[in-house]
Amino acid sequence: MRALRILLIVVVIFGGLFVIADRVAVNFAEGEAADRLKATENLSTTPDVSIKGFPFLTQVVGGSLDDIEVGITNYEAAAGNGAEKLRIDDLRADMRGVEFSGDYSSATATSATGTATIAYDELLKTAKSEPTQVAPGVTANVVGLSDGGNGKIKVTVEATVLGTKLPEPVSVLSSVTVIDGTVRVKADGLPKFGGVEIAESRVRAITDFQQKIDGLPGGIKLDKVQAAPNGVEITVKGSNVRLAG
């Protein structure tokens, strides 16, 4: 019995030392991965990197990590067509099956899924915010985007008729979709500008707009999008996503 107790004590001690060594190693690896991702994606701030699964050291020996969570705040995505970049808030991605090279200089995830938000003031950069003529004597421009409820965006438009600005802006509920990496906003109906009859195509030139978003980290792509209280919420996904190298 005494020998068994000694053996159990030794096992517990070595087990505790292994856990400590494993946690020290994973904390170091998370810091290194965050620094490499910051350099690879030219980020202004260091991202959050969390390596899941236990034990970490046995995963390292196998050359593959089961699950890594990455968080990036205020990511500036290329807006396409040389347009101004769009700020994406709180980009979170879950990377699965991450394989890395022997010298840890590169890492690639088999698959990735995640979420992010584009604030309405950022998306407004894409809309016609400067007064544009939609009919003789009538100009209009988008002055605000907000949550319209039930997954819709409320697009608020100001109009000037024969030199007089309408006393109240008009608004229309719009649907938001994503196709081939492009966020598209399309009015469900058409607003009226002081009772003036205006061709649908001219009105939609103001109310409808789209924005392509390129250059997300590691090559992940936009998947789905919906309107929410604080902005447009997007989901992203990808395969063979490059984390470093």
Image (cartoon, rainbow, N blue to C red):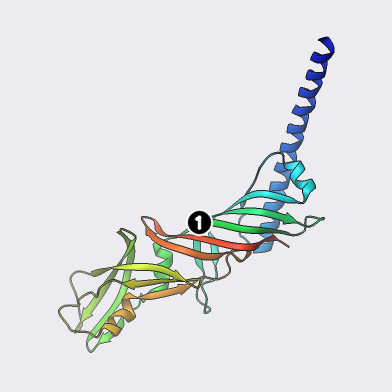
Camera sees residue 69: yes
Depicted 52 relative to depicted 121: above or below: above
Residue at image coords 75%, 27%: 16
Residue at image coords 34%, 65%: 145
- Can you give x and y, in whole percent of width and height, for residue 205 in the image? 33, 81
Along the horizontal axis of the image, is 5 left or right of 141? Answer: right
- Can you give x and y, in whole percent of width and height, for residue 77 in the image? 54, 67
In which quadrant is the N terminus drawn? top right
- Number of numbered discs visible in the structure rendering: 1
Q: Nearer the viewer, residue 244 or 181?
A: 181
Along the horizontal axis of the image, is 1 left or right of 177? Answer: right
Residue furthest top in the image: 2
Residue at image coords 74%, 45%: 59
Identify the image quadrant of residue 8. top right
Secondary structure beneath label 1: strand
- Can you give x and y, in whole percent of width and height, for residue 200 in the image? 26, 83
Along the horizontal axis of the image, is 192 left or right of 123? Answer: left
Residue furthest left in the image: 195
